[in-house]
Image (cartoon, rainbow, N blue to C red):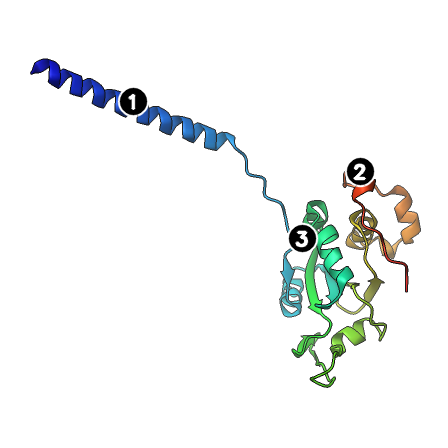
Amino acid sequence: MENTQMKKQIIIGLAIATALGTFAFMRNTASAVKVEVVPEIHWYTLEEAQKLSDAAPRKIFLDISTSWCGWCKTMDANTFHNPIIAKYMNDTYYCVKFDAETRDTVVFNGQKFANRGPVNQRSANDFAITVLQGHLSYPSFAFISKDRLSFTIMQGYMPPDQFEPYLHFYGEDKEKTMTYEEYKKTFKSNLPPADPTQQTPVPAPH
């Protein structure tokens, strides 16, 4: 009887020891595994970006695109999803993704902008028309000054290596003291060398 009781105690003890050992192994393994979080661009609404800039001035980066624009989707997938590009944009700008054909009325600097085109036809919102000065091409990008009184416009798809120096040029306010060509000569990229077999062809200017 005593032997049977002793065997039960030994079995229970071994089971507890095994469970504790397994738990400790899992805890140590979990602590050793580092989960890398890939940054993504935090896109604000136009209203949110203005409020944030009022409180803590930054330039606003405006991505003007449409739901049907193929090169806009390529820009999203190849450039805006690049972690180095995304981190810099989050750290430097208030980023806004604006649907050029939205039917919503938007307010910028106290002025209202609407889409006055026929409901059953594709048409641009007046804000997109105003920012792009009527030159509607997608994707288009606007770097809006901290006081929101001036815009710098770029148009067309850009891969990360071409887009990055522009982000830094305007992000560092270098346009106030030099030309982009001068800045580009000394710019040091944070991107890894591009793989030529993975590059997306850039559309011709239009």
Q: Which amino acid does label 1 sit on?
A: Ala
In this rendering, the label closer to the viewer, 1 or 3: 1
Q: Residues within 10 Å of mark 1 (few under 14, many from 20)?
A: few
Residue marked by disc 3:
90
Q: What element carries label 1?
A: helix
Distance from the alpha carbon under mark 1 to that under mark 2: 51 Å
Q: What element carries label 3?
A: helix
Q: What residue type is labelled 3?
A: Asn
Return the residue nearer the eye: 68 or 42: 68
Whichever of callouts 1 and 2 sits on the residue coming sooner in the sequence is 1
Distance from the alpha carbon under mark 2 to that under mark 3: 22 Å
Asked if disc 1 and disc 3 are in contact, CB closer than 8 Å, the reply is no
Residue marked by disc 1:
17
Whichever of callouts 1 and 3 sits on the residue coming sooner in the sequence is 1
* Quadrant in which the C terminus appears: bottom right
Distance from the alpha carbon under mark 1 to that under mark 3: 49 Å
Image mark for residue 193: 2
